[in-house]
Amino acid sequence: MRQIVIGAAQMGGIQKAETRAQVVARLLALLDDAAQAGCDLVVFPELCLTTFFPRWYSEDPAEIERWFEPDMPGPETRPVFESAAEKGIAISLGYAELTPDGHRFNTQIMTDQSGQIVGKYRKIHLPGHGAFDPERSFQHLEKHYFEPGDLGFPVFRNLDTWMGMLICNDRRWPEAYREMGLQGVELVCLGYNTPSANSQNASESADLRQFHSDLSVQAGAYQNSTWVVSVAKGGVEDGHHMIAGSVIVDPNGQIVARTKTEADELLVHACDMDATRFGKESVFDFKRHRRIEHYGRITRQTGVIHPDGSEG
């Protein structure tokens, strides 16, 4: 059995006024809990060092710069890496990345148990909009602050397991899981920040939004016979409420563990990576069953084109 004890390190809201040092202290406390629980790997949420700043519009370079990390680890975040390495815990951590040549990405990294970065993913499916929208009840400006990821969907070896990462809206797109599934992924680590209200549809309930989140990760896990660890930042953040509901999903698509609060909370489950084999060798034996000669439209076309040639 290839067992990994995984900690899903859900976080409560991070307020705009909180400093990096304050946030890092919260990460370190969760790592302490993980060490006591015997975790081999801890997964933190999307943008786990800052508030979800795309809810505000800004063109001020100084205001924008404060949200981004030019180095990972940097002086303020290095204690997280050092603590994890001392404890022998691998980590997956989401943050706003500023590259040396000035590009900005919504990024997640993975370390091994010695604290060395062994994987990086940059969010590809950016939701929301790129300019201030007065019609929305609040802004969702990821297309303003970030570029679409340029690394594809990498899968890498860590803890004797094929691992990959996704970020938030990526979980809603089956192509993301299948790209990794075709590389034999056995564990997907996913962080998210999802508001409980839809800024364009006030009638959509928080319960429905949680259902959609669960549905997406459960389908991705089952259809690719992989574990998925889906970790939220939840609760009230700068007056905006976000769903929590972090889950660990097994290769049959079943939720085996879920957080109970909207605050900082460590969800722990021992995951058997060999449990991925049956699905990969039967229903989802891609080599035997896929029919790629009929899938061309998926990569040729983005928007909807009806059989009569009309778009819509």
Image (tube, rainbow, N blue to C red):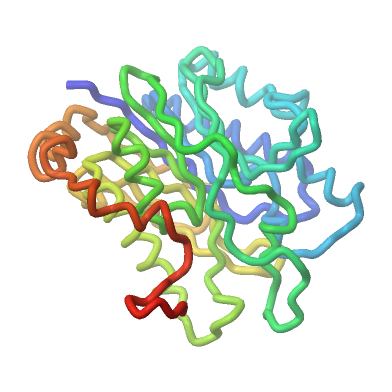
Quadrant where the N terminus is found in the figure: top left
Residue 235: quadrant of the picture: bottom right
Q: Nearer the viewer, residue 25 or 176?
A: 176
Residue drawn at (60%, 31%), measured in percent from left and top? 28
How many marks are shown on the rendered structure? 0
> From this viewpoint, is residue 93 visible?
no
Q: Nearer the viewer, residue 193 or 291?
A: 291
Q: Residue furthest front?
A: 309
Residue drawn at (91%, 55%), measured in percent from left and top? 60
Residue drawn at (77%, 45%), measured in percent from left and top? 67
Residue drawn at (74%, 32%), measured in percent from left and top? 99
- Residue 130 lies, with reference to residue 280, above or below; the image says below
Q: Nearer the viewer, residue 171 or 14?
A: 171
Is residue 65 shown left or right of residue 201? right
**Where's residue 300, x and y in %?**
42, 55
Is residue 295 shown left or right of residue 239? left
Q: Nearer the viewer, residue 272 or 99?
A: 99
**Where's residue 183, x and y in %?**
32, 31
Is residue 156 shown left or right of residue 61? left
Is residue 222 shown left or right of residue 310? left
Residue 188: quadrant of the picture: top left
> From this viewpoint, is residue 170 visible?
yes
- Residue 236 lies, with reference to residue 146, above or below; the image says below
**Where's residue 150, x and y in %?**
59, 38
**Where's residue 213, x and y in %?**
40, 61
